[in-house]
Image: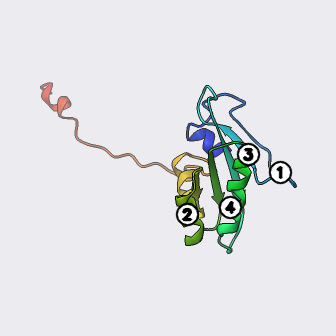
Amino acid sequence: MELLVKMGYGGSRADAGKAIGRSGDGGIDGIIKEDWLGLDVVYIQAKRWDTNAVGRPDVMQFAGALQAQKATKGIFITTSRFTEDSRGYVAQIGSKIVLIDGDQLAQLMIENDVGVSTVSLYQVKKVDSDYFDEGI
């Protein structure tokens, strides 16, 4: 949820999104407002898997959960990867589901400073030509 808020979803409001995942959550782990005004919401499913790829049945279940909520937008995040079959399924359905795999998740976290810290910064210097034009 924090990553999506840093990416601009929900704006800066304290109630921009909430995690709701628990046993019997109906396939929805979180909800986040799409914009500052909350004109639409995006539903989130997350799987923390090491080696197993997320297959078509899992994505179909999430798509069904979206339909049950009368929602058209969802984000499915995994620390693992998605099968080609699951990606193909998302491409052919009416609901807009974005699939974020482990590699993309890591990149988004780095780009948005979530779960990372800066160890060091390097200064790059150039000659200040204005300094030498002042007639020292």
CB within 8 Å, label 2 to label 3: no
The amino acid type found where label 3 is placed reads Gly
Q: Earlier in the sequence, mark 2 or mark 4?
A: 4
Colour scheme employed for the rendering of this structure: rainbow
Is 68 positioned to the left or the right of 113 in the image? right
Mark 3 element type: strand
Q: Residue 57: percent from the left, percent from the top?
A: 70, 67
Q: Do the residues under discs 2 and 4 have CB atoms within 8 angstroms?
A: no
Of callouts 1 and 2, the N-terminal one: 1
Q: How far apart are labels 1 and 3 at the CA level?
A: 9 Å
Distance (Cα) linking label 1 and label 2:
26 Å
Kind of residue sitting beneath label 1: Asp
Labels 1 and 3: the sequence-earlier one: 1
Furthest-bottom residue in view?
A: 51
Q: Which residue is mark 3?
A: 30
Alpha carbons under labels 2 and 3: distance apart: 21 Å
Q: Which residue is mark 4?
A: 60
For the residues labelled 4 and 3, the Cα–Cα distance comes to: 17 Å
**Tag nearer the camera, 4 or 3:** 4
> Of helix, strand and loop, which one carries label 4?
helix
Task: Write down the residue under mark 2.
Answer: 103
Q: Are marks 1 and 3 in contact (CB under 8 Å)?
A: no
User: Which of the 4 quarters of the picture holds residue 87?
Assistant: bottom right
Look at discs 1 and 3 and give the one toward the viewer: 1
**Mark 1 neighbour class, 10 Å CA radius: few under 14, some 14 to 19, many 20 or more:** few
Question: Which mark identifies residue 25?
Answer: 1
Residue 56 spot, x, y in % from top left: 65, 68
Q: Is residue 4 above or below residue 78?
A: above
- Residue 45 % position (x, y): 70, 53
